[in-house]
Structure formats: structure tokens, C-alpha cells
Image (cartoon, rainbow, N blue to C red):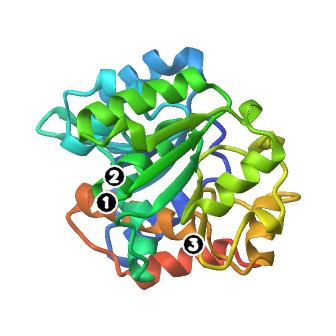
């Protein structure tokens, strides 16, 4: 039986096994594939990745925080999008070679496209500068975004992202602004939020009691905006979601993104396509009660 894995830290609550194993069973592939969690500590990353890649039964894996950038150094080949964004979340063994791709960009953009929201010439605020943010920023640029404001605790990390993405995409650096949360007083932060067409939380805030160093309120948003949190997990005191909904903005959480990126990964691993309704049912049933 071929193994497909999710590699990362803090992945015990991931829905990926439920999604992929549900699709495997539905398509009658239970005797051929199995999807499992593979938690890896940072200090063991190198040795564990080499061990996985030496396993004859390993067909591929998803990779999540904090290893989406780090994994690239271990791969034989990456596709153009992955090379440009500098982050990888999908790996497949093909003829003994490990090939990396990024399905996060597709997963992120599909819910927006499905609702008919045009991105071209619009403005976006992206919070975060990790692997998910890299995929989001590049996908926004590919879909014609007019301007990007990136807010991150570490502006040096954000500057590296900006320099790389602008270089590989040709996006004008004058349309790509960076702030630290510490740079922004309340009025300035509110004005930046209100002026954006899309606001995307690409951070791990809400996971293990981490939170953004800012409090949101409904006055920061308006009903013409899309507010998008890439996380799909329930969070205590989720002022980002609560404020967006209080302002009657369109709010999207990471469930749809999770479903679409998983769909692309599954098809490429198995050459079989599960129905979208099945993946949506698995995701929403698992998170029943999360509104």
C-alpha cells in the first residue's frame, strides 16, 4: 500500500486525513493508498525528510507550516508557480524523483472566482509573510491585483517576500507596501483596512492561543469587502471574523481553500478525481457547528 502523508508541526487537528481517506474509500482505492499524519519537529526535519524519501512505499506528501519553504531544498524539481512563490505544499514521487508543486494558490483563489468577484485592479491587504502568504500574493498578482499591502510582525521577512515576488512576477514594487503592526496606530490601521477590497489573514493567529497584535472591530470593515481567513479551525474570541460579519462584509474561512487544494493534490497523486460535493461534505461535516 502506498503512503501519502501530511508533514508539519501542530497538525493533530488537521482535516487532511479525513478528506483524502474519505476520497480514497469513495473511489475504491482503499487497498492502494492511505493518507496519514507525519508530525515532524524542526530539529528532526532533515533526517525525517530523508527517511521518508527513502521509503519505497511513500507516494508523496503534503507539507504545511513551518516547512513550506524549507522543503524545496530537498526536491529534485519544482514547477513554475512554486519556484516563483518560493513555497511548496505538495510533493509527488515520479519515476524515483521528488517533484514539488503549490496547490495553495489555486485553493485560495477558487472560492473568490466561484462567487464572481473580480480581482483585477483591486487592492488587497495580506497579513503574514510565511509560505501561505507567498502563494496568496503570487496568485493575487497572477489574477491582476492592482496593489498589495503586506502587514507582518517581522518586516525583514516581509521585505524578502516582496523582493522575491516582485522580481519573479514583474509586479511593481511601488504598488507593494510593507508595514509592521508596530508601525500602525489605530487610526492608520483602520484606514488601511477600510480602503482595501480584499483583506486576507495568512497568519497562524488563533492556533495554540497565538493572536495578532491588533484588535479588530466592525468599523474597520465594510459590506463591499471580502474578508478571508485562510485558517478553518474554530478560534476563541475571533474578533477578525466577528467584526467582518458585524460589518456585513463577505467572510470566507479556509474550508473552501482546504477543499480545493486537496482536490488538486489528490488528482495528481492518484489520477482519480473525487466529486467536489464529497470533499465539501467531509470538510463541513467535520466542522459542523463552526459558523
| Distance from Cα at disc 3 to Cα at disc 1 | 30 Å
Question: Which of the two labelled residues, at mark 3 and mark 1, occupies the earlier sequence position?
Answer: 1
Residue 262 in sight in this render: no
- Identify the residue under disc 1: 144
| Quadrant position of residue 30 | bottom left
Residue 174 locus on image (x, y percent) = 40, 38
Q: CA distance from mark 2 to mark 1?
A: 5 Å
Residue 252 pos. (x, y %): 60, 71
Q: Name the residue rendered at 39%, 67% in the picture.
A: 119
Residue sitting nearer the eye, 237 or 16: 237
The residue that label 2 is drawn on is 141
* Residue indicated by mark 3: 283
Instruction: Answer yes or no: is residue 184 visible.
Output: yes
Q: Residue at x 74, y 46 (%)?
A: 188
Secondary structure under the numbered disc 2 in the rendered image = helix
Q: Earlier in the sequence, mark 2 or mark 3?
A: 2
Residue nearest the viewer, comparing 255 with 116: 116
Numbered label attached to residue 70: none
Disc 2 packing (10 Å; few <14; some 14–19; many ≥20):
many
Where is residue 259? Give x, y as percent: 46, 68
| The quadrant where residue 83 appears | top left
Q: Mark 2 to mark 3: distance in Å?
A: 28 Å
Identify the image quadrant of the C terminus. bottom right
Amino acid at each position: 500500500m502506498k503512503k501519502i502523508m501530511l508533514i508539519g508541526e501542530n497538525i493533530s487537528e488537521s482535516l487532511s486525513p479525513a478528506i483524502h481517506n474519505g476520497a480514497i474509500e469513495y473511489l475504491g482505492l482503499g487497498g492502494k493508498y492511505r493518507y496519514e499524519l507525519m508530525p515532524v519537529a524542526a530539529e528532526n526535519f532533515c533526517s525525517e525528510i530523508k527517511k521518508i524519501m527513502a521509503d519505497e512505499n511513500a507516494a508523496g506528501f503534503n507539507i504545511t507550516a513551518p516547512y513550506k519553504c524549507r522543503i524545496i531544498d530537498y526536491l529534485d524539481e519544482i514547477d513554475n508557480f512554486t519556484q516563483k512563490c518560493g513555497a511548496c505544499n505538495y510533493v509527488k514521487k515520479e519515476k524515483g524523483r521528488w517533484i514539488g508543486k503549490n496547490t495553495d494558490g489555486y485553493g485560495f483563489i477558487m472560492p473568490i472566482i466561484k462567487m464572481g468577484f473580480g480581482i483585477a485592479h483591486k487592492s488587497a491587504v495580506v497579513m503574514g509573510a510565511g509560505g501561505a502568504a507567498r502563494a496568496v500574493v503570487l496568485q493575487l498578482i497572477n489574477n491582476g491585483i492592482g496593489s498589495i499591502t503586506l502587514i507582518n510582525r517581522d518586516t525583514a521577512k516581509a521585505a524578502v517576500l516582496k523582493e522575491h515576488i516582485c522580481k519573479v512576477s514583474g509586479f511593481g514594487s511601488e504598488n507593494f507596501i510593507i508595514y509592521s503592526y508596530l508601525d500602525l496606530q489605530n487610526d492608520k490601521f483602520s484606514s488601511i483596512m477600510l480602503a482595501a477590497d480584499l483583506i486576507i489573514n495568512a497568519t497562524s493567529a488563533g492556533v495554540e492561543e497565538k493572536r495578532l497584535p491588533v484588535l479588530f472591530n466592525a468599523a474597520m470593515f465594510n459590506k463591499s469587502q471580502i474578508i478571508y481567513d485562510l485558517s478553518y479551525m474554530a478560534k476563541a474570541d475571533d474578533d477578525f471574523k466577528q467584526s467582518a460579519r458585524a460589518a456585513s462584509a463577505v467572510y470566507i474561512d479556509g474550508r473552501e481553500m482546504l477543499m480545493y487544494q486537496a482536490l488538486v493534490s489528490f488528482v495528481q497523486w492518484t489520477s482519480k478525481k473525487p466529486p467536489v460535493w464529497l470533499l465539501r461534505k467531509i470538510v463541513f461535516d467535520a466542522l459542523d457547528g463552526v459558523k
